[in-house]
Amino acid sequence: MIQLFVRFVLAPLARLVYRPAVHGIENVPSHGPVIFASNHRAALDTGVITFVTPRQVKFLGKAEYFVGTSLKGRFVAGFLSGLGYVPVERGNAQAGLAALEAARKVLDARGAFAIYPEGTRSLDGRLHRGHTGVGALALATGAVVVPVAVSGTENLQPGGERIPRLAKVSVRFGKPLNFARYDGMDSSPAIRRAVTDEIMYAILELSDQEYVDKYHKRPDQDAA
């Protein structure tokens, strides 16, 4: 019920109010497994991608957000499910494998899955080196990859404001990337890196961000 509300009521309302500029929507396949690989500017990127994409898109979400038994907890879980989040345990040695397996189930069912190859939001506005999970996923499933660039979302909640303000937001969808030429080579770290780099370059061309060839670390990671 909440999924229908998000898709057919909340999404059209958000598009009407915020009027995001959407480019390249014709590049989104109407059916079949597809991976949306996007840059990551702000927490609201997920909502924006969900609202402007014609297909129902799944994202990974922290499992703890889905276990609340109170009325509020059940509402949060339902709302996140409506946005397309799939619960995954994090913070243990098997977390990466669990995340890839959850994503693979979506794609094996011929669904659409979105991922942020940088792994975390960019705090400096630059596009950082992608983690190879997106390459591994594309190679293992045979899904095409649609590069995505969002911009302006970092201005929706400046300073951690609770209610998003009106801001100019755009989403660009690039042409689908097909990696069938690497069939049977998904176990090769070099191939996974090559595929990931190709995806990141496509995102870079769409976003016009400055590229940094190193993984992005948040301040708390630097202190660890």
Image (cartoon, rainbow, N blue to C red):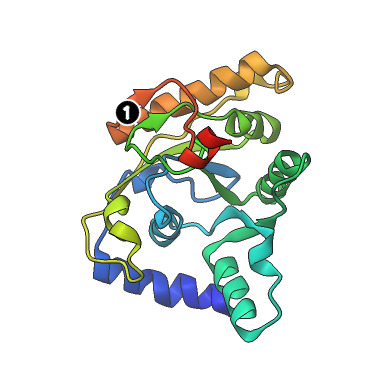
Q: Where is the N terminus found, in terms of image quarters?
A: bottom right
Location of residue 159 in the rendering, given as x and y in whole percent from the top left corner? 31, 58
Identify the image quadrant of residue 195. Answer: top right
Q: Is residue 37 visible?
A: no
Position of residue 113 in the picture relative to residue 136 (left or right)? left
Above or below residue 164? Residue 190 is: above
| Residue at 59% over, 60% down | 85
Location of residue 142 in the rendering, given as x and y in whole percent from the top left corner? 65, 33
Label 1: few (<14), some (14–19) or many (≥20) C-alpha neighbours in 10 Å: few
Q: Amino acid at mark 1?
A: Glu
Residue most extreme to the top: 190
Q: Is residue 201 visible?
A: yes
Residue most extreme to the right: 94
Q: According to the image, label 1 marks what residue? A: 205
Number of dots carrying numbers: 1
Residue most extreme to the front: 223
Above or below residue 48? Residue 123 is: above
Position of residue 100 in the picture relative to residue 40 (left or right)? right
Above or below residue 70? Residue 48 is: above
Position of residue 81 in the picture relative to residue 197 (left or right)? right
| Residue at 36% over, 48% down | 25
Q: Where is the C terminus found, in terms of image quarters?
A: top right
| Residue at 49% over, 57% down | 55
User: Which one is nearer the viewer's eye here, 181 or 7?
Assistant: 7
Position of residue 122 in the picture relative to residue 182 (left or right)? left
Q: Secondary structure at mark 1?
A: helix
Location of residue 29 in the rendering, given as x and y in whole percent from the top left corner? 48, 45
